[in-house]
Amino acid sequence: MSVTVRVPTILRSLTGGQSEVSVDGAGTLVELLDKLDAEHPGIRGRVLDDDGKLRRFVNVYVGEEDVRFAGGLQTPTPDGATVSIIPAVAGG
Amino acid sequence: MTTLLDTPTFGAAANLFCRECGATYDLGPGNACEQCFGPLEIGYDADLLARVTRESIEAGPRTMWRYGELLPVAPVVDLQVGCTRLVKADNLARELGMKTLWVKDDSGNPTHSFKDRVVAVAASAAKSLGFSVLSCASTGNLANAVAAAAARAGMRSVVFIPSDLEDGKVITTAVYGGTLVAIDGNYDDVNRLCAEVAGEQDDWAFVNVNVRPFYAEGSKTVGYEIAEQLGWRLPEQVVVPVASGALLTKVDKAWRELSQLGLVDGSPYKVFGAQATGCSPVSAAFKAGHDVVQPVRPSTIAKSLAIGNPADGIYALDVVRRTGGAIADVSDDEVVAGIQLLARTTGVFGETAGGVTVATLKALLASGQLDPAAETVILNTGDGLKTLDAVAPVAQPTATIAPSLAAFRASGLA
């Protein structure tokens, strides 16, 4: 089992064009991002700012849940979970 | 993959730039910065913009495309949008103790909301960029506009809406014959899904996702029109309903452009925002003095404004604070009363968003934040016929009587 990460178009240059990548299960979202960055260098710095916080124009979902309504970067990301990284600048 | 038309025409538009970090990109699809996820905005060639004159605009068609020199694309798809009426609302002004009040009534557009403006630009951009399908996430008004524009352009449309929308927005979308997908979720859920689908369907133009920089520029035409209709000058105050916040920021952008180009005298103005309390993340941030907007889960009859995670919320805050305006919010009961007040005093039947705006105008006057002596424009962005349920309980026949003169006399209605 692993965690499926859905990658937005603007980050696919870092994943060899893949729209979905798999990462071994990690305890929390921030740990998952570290693992993701080890395999696809640069991706953590696109999602998090210099202070290690979620950039304000990115939304991250674990399953159907917006992590800003859940545990933020400490949201659990167990094996089998799907994590979606989505640009926030849409709609209206 | 998409195929470009032989000669896509982007007018005075020069590039896309990130509002957050300033990174620039070639004109094309895309709404978020590759570096920081910040929103992309259309940049213009200042020399080309400087050629625009009042005369060149006035020589144009009586549609929003008279401002085509200030837009990022040529009118490939044209439903004769815009040039809606600016109504001098003397009765409403008197009732509210105001000196001069105007209603910019965008219910007069082809599908009865301001969304025809943004879709006109987005659909033209989509065609120019070679997309084959026109799509969107919508609270209803945009759904109407996209389905109609796609029908006129001979494109397929795929429109995504929350499943709890009013009939007046579902039927008025489905009738155009495109694909209409109702999602069991709120608008923010729909929006999220569309952002993901947009990442998979290379030849689909989601007007408010992957062609959003073009789309949003269409809202500038509301601001241009108000200025031209006032005789090439700006009002002192404007009240704009806030969903994503994009309309508010683009009215301001339009007026700054006109000032910079010398087409108006550049007098100062204050921009006010209006929300329903049941979905008021931008108003809450304004009141709390925050420069970030905390997302909320919406619960209001003003469904066209029910965006809990507004993409341009922080920029709307910037505009309101820079100009010395304010953002306020009103209850659903006040929204209904606002619809009635506008209809009773002005003969304009606005949708719930219009009710939000009128009620917020009243609230801002009561709180002293809005000056009753300053010339004010409010925006009615959609048609009350789309949200009949909101007023049905309070808008019924005065009496039902038998078809006889005796019954009429007895009714006491004369």
Image (tube, rainbow, N blue to C red):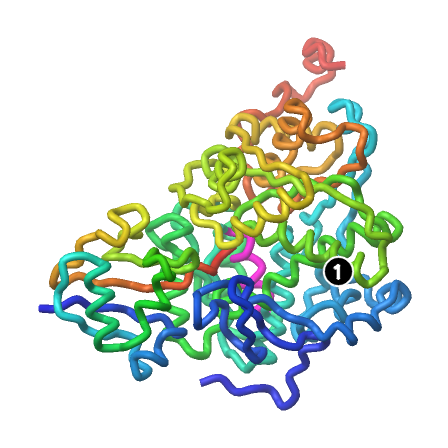
Q: Quick one: B98 or B18, which is closer to the camera?
A: B18
**Residue lying at 40% horizontally and 75% vertically, measured from the top left:** B201
Local secondary structure at mark 1: helix
Q: Quick one: B147 or B53, which is closer to the camera?
A: B53
* B261 vs B294: above or below: below
Residue indicated by mark 1 = B257
Q: Quick one: A67 or B275, which is closer to the camera?
A: A67
Percent coordinates x, y for residue A8 in the rendering: 36, 70
Percent coordinates x, y for residue B259 in the rendering: 80, 57
As drawn, is B104 to the left or to the right of B363? right
Which residue is situated farthest in the front direction here? A51
Q: Which residues make up the magenta segment?
A: B140-151
Which residue is situated farthest in the left direction here? A1
Report crowding for label 1: few under 14, some 14 to 19, many 20 or more residues within 10 A (C-alpha): some
Q: Quick one: B4 or B270, which is closer to the camera?
A: B270
Q: Is residue B89 visible?
A: yes
Percent coordinates x, y for residue B368 in the rendering: 68, 25
As drawn, is B198 to the left or to the right of B21? left
